[in-house]
Amino acid sequence: MFNFLSRLHIISDDKNALEEYIKNNAKLIDVRIAEELSSGKVAEALHIPMQEVPGHLDKFDKKENIIVFCRTGNRSEHVKEFLLNHGFENVLNGGSWQQVEKLIQKNK
């Protein structure tokens, strides 16, 4: 039987840019739903499900570095575009939570 998750295409921004943001203490936002967190999570990240992001815009500085991520990078790409369209200047799509975790561990 095929492992569904291994066939998913991960969408993310440039890994070098992501590493720079991580080195500079970017705000990390996990946009998965609560039930998905049981598969693992990034300890340093805020959890704000995608559909709740519009209600939390006042919690962020529009000039700070932000990395959004989810399970495959699809939802986080939508959140990234939403934030950019609402005046946020430095937002990257980190792709999957596992990818963001690996980059954090690499840069510790």
Image (cartoon, grey):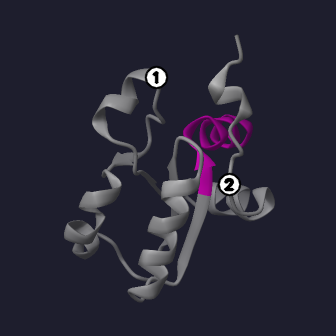
Distance, label 1 to label 2, CA atoms, is 19 Å
- Confirm whether residue 70 shows in the render: yes
The span picked out in magenta is: 94-108
Q: Residue at x 40, y 51 (%)?
A: 31
Which residue is most to the front?
A: 1
Q: Residue at x 63, y 41 (%)?
A: 104
Does 2 sit above or below residue 34? above
Q: What amino acid type should be assigned to the residue bearing mark 1?
A: Ser
Q: Which residue is mark 2?
A: 11
Q: Is residue 64 magenta?
A: no
Q: Residue at x 77, y 62 (%)?
A: 14
Local secondary structure at mark 1: helix
Q: Which residue is mark 1?
A: 39
Local secondary structure at mark 2: loop
Q: Residue at x 55, y 64 (%)?
A: 77
Query: Mark 2, residues whose alpha carbon is within 10 Å: few (<14), some, or many (≥20)?
Result: some
Please name whichever residue, 104 or 74, is drawn nearer the observer in this view of the structure. 74
Does 59 sit above or below residue 45? below
Please provide percent x and percent y for residue 84. Answer: 48, 82
